[in-house]
């Protein structure tokens, strides 16, 4: 009984989700390796969404707080710039190789799996099927696996690829260990960044500037625990796959932080009120669009603007953030002279005598 819908709204939501999945399965296979498959309208929408997603990923990468904080560990400006170069180089390599990784998986499934007998499927189908990551339903009862009869969770693509390609299980273990290490490292960096920002920038700077170091440390640890519990609770709700969650994080970073980061460095007239307005406005419109277009929040793509998917919602918050920072900064007092000199020093830092 606990599995039954609690009310009419939940029942309708489940039915719509199942209907959407079945309609996607009923569609004919798209041409393999075509850049923007579908008719002219679908092709234009796919191309537009691709451009919007690329903008959110690239701009969001430049504004991720847990990445920016790493540059403060360098001892000099020159080494900080070198660190930026190397980090962007490895990020570029990752972004370039990830699509190729997906194409390899698609090629193997199309050539080695689809059309095979259900009695002779590879072992990885059964192993990943036990945890609900792979599903097979013989709809026409012919004993042959069709593409529409295969359900593959996108979250398992990376982990299952070595087994799909027939590599030894040791490789799968290495991939899983690398993925776990990356996830823990990223989660740790994000939790520390959020907790430090709340405890230092909000609590110490604005609420209790006379707080002792011990009290601030206790506040940091407490906020770290609270943020971790909230993140775990949100993850337990499973609003979508990991791809959407990561893309949404990049969209939020792009819309909330990038305009303030750029104008705060390259425009001396920008002040704190403009930065606050830009961050709130960019973040607000991004979250609003995601809520209006994503099924988990009760939204629908019928409310989408220009057909943009919710994963790329940051493309709307980005220009709004720039606009609000400029307008609000111009109608409010200019920042003090020492702040403008600080901005100048950030752009053209004075080198140490040893580096000159």
Image (tube, rainbow, N blue to C red):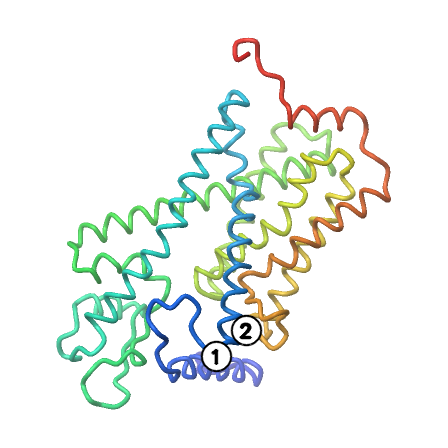
Pinpoint residue 31: horizontal percent, then vertical percent.
Answer: 35, 74
Where residue 344 sits, quadrant-wise, is top right
Pinpoint residue 97: horizontal percent, then vertical percent.
Answer: 35, 51
> Could you give the CA–CA distance between mark 1 and mark 2, rounded to whole angstroms?
8 Å
Instruction: Determine the residue positioned at 52% across, 22% down.
Output: 78
Is disc 1 in contact with disc 2, using a CB cutoff of under 8 Å? yes
User: What quarter of the picture does the N terminus occupy?
Assistant: bottom left
Q: Who is closer to the viewer here, 278 or 78? A: 78
Q: Which mark is residue 164?
A: none
Instruction: Determine the residue positioned at 17% across, 54% down.
Output: 169
Pinpoint residue 261: horizontal percent, then vertical percent.
Answer: 64, 40
Q: Which mark is residue 17?
A: 1
Crowd class of label 1 (few under 14; some 14 to 19; many from 20; radius 10 Å): some
Instruction: Specify the farthest residue to the front.
Output: 40
- In primary-sequence order, the first of circles 1 and 2 is 1
On screen, 29 above or below 59? below
Task: Give the left or right position of residue 355, taking residue 91 as reference.
Answer: right
Q: Who is closer to the viewer here, 107 or 175? A: 107
Where residue 202 sits, quadrant-wise, is top right
Instruction: Determine the residue positioned at 34% across, 67% down.
Output: 33
Task: Give the left or right position of residue 356, taking residue 114 as reference.
Answer: right
Q: SS for tag 2?
A: helix
Q: Which residue is mark 2?
A: 295
Task: Give the left or right position of residue 88, taking residue 334 as reference.
Answer: left
């Amino acid at each position: 009984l606990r599995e039954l819908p609690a009310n009419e709204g939940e029942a309708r939501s489940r039915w719509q989700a199942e209907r959407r999945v079945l309609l996607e399965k009923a569609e004919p296979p798209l041409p393999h390796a075509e850049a923007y498959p579908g008719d002219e309208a679908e092709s234009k929408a796919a191309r537009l969404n691709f451009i919007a997603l690329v903008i959110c990923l690239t701009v969001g990468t430049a504004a991720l707080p847990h990445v920016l904080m790493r540059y403060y560990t360098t001892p000099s400006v020159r080494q900080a710039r070198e660190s930026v170069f190397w980090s962007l180089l490895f990020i570029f390599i990752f972004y370039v190789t990830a699509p190729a990784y997906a194409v390899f998986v698609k090629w193997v499934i199309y050539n080695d799996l689809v059309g095979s007998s259900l009695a002779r499927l590879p072992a990885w189908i059964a192993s990943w099927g036990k945890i609900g990551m792979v599903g097979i339903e013989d709809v026409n009862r012919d004993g042959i696996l069709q593409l529409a009869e295969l359900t593959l969770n996108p979250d398992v693509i990376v982990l299952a690829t070595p087994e799909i390609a027939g590599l030894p299980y040791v490789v799968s273990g290495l991939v899983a260990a690398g993925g776990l290490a990356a996830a823990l490292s990223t989660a740790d960096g994000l939790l520390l960044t959020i907790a430090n920002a709340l405890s230092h920038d909000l609590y110490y700077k604005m609420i209790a500037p006379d707080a002792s170091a011990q009290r601030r440390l206790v506040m940091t640890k407490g906020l770290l625990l609270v943020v971790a519990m909230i993140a775990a609770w949100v993850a337990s709700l499973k609003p979508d796959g990991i791809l959407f969650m990561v893309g949404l994080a990049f969209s939020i970073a792009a819309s909330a932080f990038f305009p303030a980061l750029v104008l705060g460095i390259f425009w001396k007239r920008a002040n704190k009120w403009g930065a606050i307005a830009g961050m709130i406005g960019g973040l607000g419109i991004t979250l609003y669009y995601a809520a209006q277009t994503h099924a988990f929040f009760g939204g629908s793509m019928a409310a989408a603007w220009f057909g943009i998917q919710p994963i790329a919602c940051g493309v709307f918050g980005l220009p709004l953030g720039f606009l609000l920072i400029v307008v609000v900064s111009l109608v409010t007092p200019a920042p003090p002279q020492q702040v403008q000199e600080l901005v100048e020093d950030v752009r053209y830092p004075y080198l140490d005598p040893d580096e000159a």
